[in-house]
Amino acid sequence: MNWERVLIPAGVVVVAGAGFVGYQAFHTVRQYRADAESTIAQLSEDLARATEENQTLTQALHEEQDKMQAFEDQIEDITGTVGILDRLQKTDKELLQKYSKTFFLNEHYRPSALTEIPPEYRSPADDDEYFHKEGWPFLEDLLDEADGDGVSLLVASGYRSFDEQKNVKSQYTVTYGTAANQFSADQGYSEHQLGTAVDFTTESLNGGLDGFGKTEAYAWLQKNAYKYGFIISYPEENTYYQFEPWHWRFVGVELAKDLHKHEEYFYDLDQREIDEYLVNLFE
C-alpha cells in the first residue's frame, strides 16, 4: 500500500510538470509571434518611409536632370548662335545682294578668294577665267554632272573686276549704243564682279552665247542647276535685262532649292528675306 501511495503522487507531479512546460512553450511562441509581428510592422513602416523618401529623391533627381538638360540646351543654343554669328561675320554680305540696277559695288571690291577655272571646263577660245574659291566646288560638281549626262557645258565668262566690266560695257555701247543697257550692266552693278556668276556656253556654239536658250545645255540647267546652288538671274520677262539663258549665279543650295520649289526668282524676293540664307551660303 505504501508503495502505491508513493507512485500516485509521483505520477501526478509528472503530469503537472508536463502541463507547465507546455504552457511555457505556448506562452513563448505567442511572445515570439507578437515580437515578429511588431518587427514586421516596424519593417513595413520603415519600408514605406524609405519608399517615400526614394520617390522624393527620384523626383528631385529628375528635376535636377531636367534643369541640367535645360542648361545644356541653353549652352547649345548659345554655342549655335555664336557659330552662326561667326559664320555671318566671315561670309561676304555682298554675295547675296541684289545688284542689277539696285545695289552698287564700288571699284575697290574684290572677292575674298578666287580660283582659276581649269581649262577643261572653259570655252576653248576663252582666256583665263576665275570663280569664287568657296563656290567653285559647287560649280565643278555641276559641270561634272552635266558631262556625266552627256551634256556639253562650258564656262564662257566668270569673274570680272570693276574695270573689266567697264571695258565690256564700253565695247557694247560702241557697238549697240544705248541698246547695250538692255543686256549689259554698268560697272558696279554686274553680278560678275562678285565672282559667283558665270556665263555658260556649249561646244555647238563655239563658245558663243547667242542661241544658248535653244540648246540641250540650257534645258539641262533648267532641270538641274538649283541642285548645285545656281539660279538664272534674268529669266524671260524679267524687269532688269533681256532674257539671258546663259547667265547663272551661285546663291547657295538652300536658297536655290527654295526658289525652284516655289517657282520664284531671286530678284522677286525682298532683300531681308534673301539675307536669311547668307549663313548657309557655302553649305
Image (cartoon, rainbow, N blue to C red):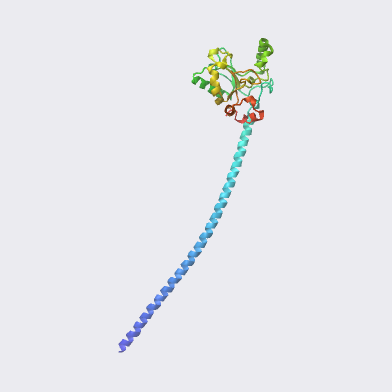
Above or below 175: residue 229: below
Front residue (pair 31, 48):
48
Q: Residue 187: horizontal and vertical position, in percent?
A: 68, 18
Q: Residue 20: horizontal and vertical position, in percent?
A: 40, 78
Q: Residue 131: horizontal and vertical position, in percent?
A: 59, 21
- Taking the spot 68% from the left edge, 10% from the top edge, the residue there is 174
Extreme residue in the front direction: 237
- Taking the spot 47% from the left edge, 67% from the top edge, the residue there is 37
Front residue (pair 223, 114):
223
Query: Is residue 166 at all visible to an observer of this figure?
Result: no
Front residue (pair 276, 139):
276
Extreme residue in the bottom direction: 1
The quarter in which the N terminus is drawn is bottom left
Query: On the rendered structure, is 173 left or right of 153?
Result: right
Q: Residue 164: horizontal and vertical position, in percent?
A: 65, 15
Extreme residue in the top direction: 175
Quadrant location of residue 26?
bottom left
Q: How many labels does the image show?
A: 0
- Taking the spot 53% from the left edge, 21% from the top edge, the residue there is 220
Quadrant location of residue 172?
top right
Quadrant location of residue 198?
top right
Above or below 255: residue 9: below
